[in-house]
Amino acid sequence: MEKYFRPDKLEADPNSQTAAKEFKHWYETFKNFLESNKSTEKSLEDKDNKTYISAIKILEELYIKPTNEIYARHILATRKQQINESIDQYAQQLKLLAKNCNFKAVSSEENKNDYIRDAFINGLVQSNIRQRLLEFSSLSLDEALSKSRSLEDSQKQSDTYHAALNNIASCSHPNSEQTTLASVQTKPGQTCYFCGHPRHPRSVCPARAAICQNCHKIGHWFKMCMQSKKSQTRSTYASTMVIASSMETPQSLSKCIAKVTVNQIDANALIDTGSSDTFLDHKFAVENKLKIFPIQGVQVSMAYMSFSANIQGYCLINIQVDKEKYDQTKVLGLSNLCTDWIHDDVSSRKYVQQTPLYDIGTTKLLG
């Protein structure tokens, strides 16, 4: 009979989910085996003189983990009936879950506090606080409230600290896109010269990563390509120019210079896509005896700076770019330009399509 009662070797994994169940089954089988052989504790002493009881205690500590009473009650309270689960099956599952809840015979006051504690944990909005409370194997109502207050205060202090850091960062490094957008909104009706849509920050331009099918460059659409416009009209490039003759042009602007005439006077024209108006250097007008009409209280400002300059009147001049002529063009006079004339918009001139332009965007245009 001994071979039938003798249990198999215990090979359960202590870390598996069924370790406790397997050990309990093995232990009951082992006790039956000892009873059938009428063994005594003395005969089971091992080499280290450890008794049978101490050996079993070590095995129980290894395979039977202490249950988390708070978590077990949370699982019981939140267990819902499944779709295909009958009433009897649902009740049976609740009874099985209740075995891990360590229910005890307590007073009505203790029972009330336990019920309030369970409802408090289940109803918390902040999941991080609920998670921390469920980590405790046992917890009274007062302990749950105290720990929750501490966690809530810590979260508020952390949020305040991060908000202060964000404010400091935003003050130290203002959003360049918002600054650009503010300057864009000061000039309604203008369009982006990369996509043709109403003005917007470059970072959100839909054509920023587009590849032009005409010039194969990245950053603009085909309809806005300057090379495409040159094939359609001979004088499109004249839409954004600065005429210069009496002053030396900066080396950085040399590639934008074109030959033009102003009232039969040879001059250089600087292409400038950032100009919102047509400007003429006041010194150039005086030296060439151009008639200057007065303007009072008019200023021109920089789009990306607080710098501004007073308009020194205006002139009506005749301009010739290649074979195209523009008679009686109104230009505003400004002092100390690095060139003599800033041409903004020739959309009203014949054979020329409109090119979107902006405010003066660089101090290089001012001497």
Image (spheres, helix red, strand yellow):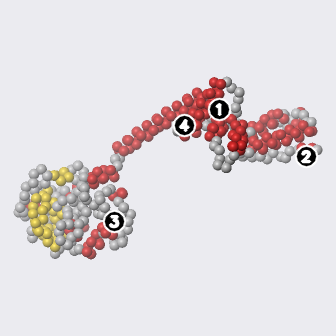
Pair 4/1: label in front: 4
Pair 2/3: label in front: 2
Q: Which residue is mark 3?
A: 220
What's the mark number on residue 124? Answer: 4
Who is closer to the viewer here, 301 or 245?
A: 301
- Mark 3 to mark 1: distance in Å? 66 Å
Q: Amino acid at mark 1?
A: Ser
Q: Residue furthest front?
A: 87
Q: Earlier in the sequence, mark 2 or mark 1?
A: 2
What's the mark number on residue 138? Answer: 1
Query: As drawn, is 67 to the left or to the right of 296?
Result: right
Q: Quadrant of residue 131?
A: top right
Q: Are marks 2 and 3 in contact (CB under 8 Å)?
A: no
- Mark 2 to mark 1: distance in Å? 42 Å
**Label 3: how many Cα within 10 Å (few below 14, some 14–19, many 20+):** many
**Label 1: how many Cα within 10 Å (few below 14, some 14–19, many 20+):** some
Q: Is residue 13 above or below residue 359?
A: above
Q: Secondary structure at mark 1?
A: loop
Give the residue drawn at x 27%, y 54%: 184
Q: Which residue is mark 2?
A: 4
Pair 4/2: label in front: 4
